[in-house]
Amino acid sequence: MEKKPYYITTAIAYTSAKPHIGNTYEIVLADAIARYKRMTGYDVYFQTGTDEHGQKIQEKAEAAGISPQEYVDNISGEIKRIWDLMNTTYDRFVRTTDPQHVRKVQKIFKKMHDKGDIYKGKYVGKYCTPCESFWTESQLVDGKCPDCGREVRDAEEEAYFFRMSKYADRLMKHIEEHPEFIQPESRKNEMVNNFLKPGLQDLCVSRTSFTWGIPVEFDPGHVVYVWLDALSNYITFCGYDPDGNHDEQYHKYWPADLHLIGKDIIRFHTIYWPIFLMSMGEPLPKQVFGHPWLLVQGGKMSKSQGNVIYADDLVELFGVDAIRYFVLHEIPFANDGVMTYELIIERVNSELANILGNLVNRTIAMDQKYFGGEIMAPTQSDPVDEELKAVALELPAKVEARMNELKVADAIDEIFVLLRRANKYIDETAPWALARDMEANGARLGTVLYNLLESIRYAAIMLQPYLPDTSEKMLRQLGVENGGVESLTAFNGMPVGGHVGQAEILFARLDMAKKLEEIEAFNAAKAKAALPALEVEPQSQEQVDFDTFSKSDLRAVKVKDCQPVKKSKKLLRFTLDDGTGTDRQILSGIAAYYKPEELIGKTLIAIVNLPARKMMGLESNGMLISAVHTEKGEEKLNLIMVDDSIPAGAKLC
């Protein structure tokens, strides 16, 4: 029988920085769903990748002194490394700098333009560079970006706009007729009430203030808005052809069954993307799920908060499956989850080491001890066996029901219900007591161990999507080769007369205090290794007498204005309050290190009794004091700034 196709995507990761564990949660969640679908007979196509254009990336590359392409190559490689480290089974890792994608996006843009859905105009408003998002004044929260809470800047430039209102009613109707389209329900209500009902404004879909993007083919001064570029990846890499000659893959897998994304980008995927597809005349995805966040120290992870934790560091400390288990189990369907090192240790000890690992280890060890590892026939049943069997037999259907609702944490809980029941069964049957009289109780002991082994087999198979390495180890210890879910139709899958393998520790218990000390030392070593190698200029051996030094008149000066000097790449022209009542002009060659607007209002230190000198036709009266060092082979400069409470003209002595 032909398998039913299933297409799942993650949001493509933005290549501005290395992904933290909160970002990594999404790929692990998608992988668990993809693995489950494959296990239950679907033909799965699982796509992920990186989003590589935009103003933020151009600025990051400039700051790093490398080209944008080199910058995204580095970050994309790092993202792929982490996705692979987490044992994810994506079928394709895409990149939006791929020439094929670039050509298709250019054709999509032109197709929308020729249809009249895109028109040329002028954008005036607010722009959030980190989110690559446009906002009106009324949409801001306390004057800041409503999505990320960071500063926005005024933006005014020629741009192309998409007529969003043209498709708003059609989108609203689709949402009403397909209640499963946006999940969870809270995300759908947010989109309908906050965006669709108030009325959609036309969307700016091109930029002219930077160059790192896909050029608009018929108007090269413009680059395509990064979200139109990024969202199109779901079809451009799946065989879509803007000219209508779609590949067989597109006909097979589109529309996507599931777009799995973070809740912070739900607007782009449930309003912009469906409307873009309507404009193109293509079917809408079947479902968009906006998953919650993983919070650390009470908030969303960010470098500015100093609470970023990376997946590869956690793997080094705890192992892949322990971290997969934590992120999949600790983040509920619709609510944010919380991560602390203490909580990870607690989960490893109480659930992975005790409930799961201890059950497997002592069951295999008892079978080795009492029967030489042979799997005995279950010939002497008691009523206590039936409840354990019932829990096992009901497990596949219960997990399926949870997974169909995308309640992955609940699906894992169902498996642990069986594991807990098996542990209770050991207490109820006391195999060690039965073993004291093998002649009288050998048949019953063999039955008890068979039931335990069979329960572990059920759990091992059902754990494959979530803890793939652990599942494989469990099946190997059981001596089971067939790990297919189709074998879970009857409670008789363990081969009588076969042999189990050797007992191995799946998860070792962790000493809380010692592990926290290890983590503290690990993080300290990582922080030390991340510090830049600094080089400072050697101190001069030439002696200067005190009278000579005293002749330098160093004063605090306030920056009233700062402007670039025309036709100079290096010079900034400072207008300074030096306390005399007359403005002082100083020219300084620091344009490579500071933007003029950053310095207005600052209190600096200047030598004010140097003779005047001409620079680019302008007179400079003094010199600003800076500190210079070399970092990773690159010269760095910092102006000496002092407390603003120090008055202009105050003398340094």
Image (cartoon, rainbow, N blue to C red):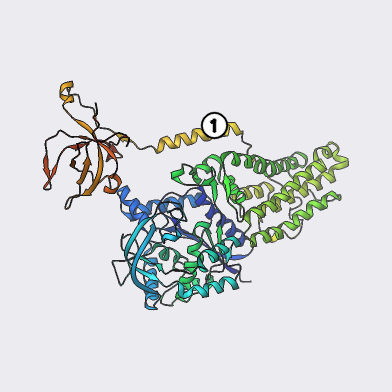
Residue 104, placed above or below residue 638: below
Residue 7, placed above or below residue 526: below
Whole-percent x, y for residue 153 in the image: 36, 55
Q: Which residue does the image show at 71% across and 43% down from the upper left?
A: 359
Q: Which residue does the image show at 79% across and 45% down from the upper left?
A: 425
Quadrant (top left/top right/bottom left/bottom right) for the C terminus? top left
Q: Which residue does the image show at 66% across and 41% down from the upper left?
A: 353
The residue lying furthest to the front in this view is 581
Q: Which residue does the image show at 17% across and 29% down from the upper left?
A: 552
The answer to whether residue 525 is left or right of residue 253 is left
- Camera-side residue of 331 and 373: 331
Residue 297: name its quadrant: top right
Q: Amino acid at mark 1?
A: Glu
Q: Which residue is mark 1?
A: 517
- Camera-side residue of 124 and 350: 124
Quadrant (top left/top right/bottom left/bottom right) for the N terminus? bottom right
Whole-percent x, y for residue 376 in the image: 79, 48
Q: Residues within 10 Å of mark 1 (few under 14, many from 20)?
A: few
**Mark 1, secondary structure of its residue:** helix
Query: Is residue 357 visible to us here?
Result: yes
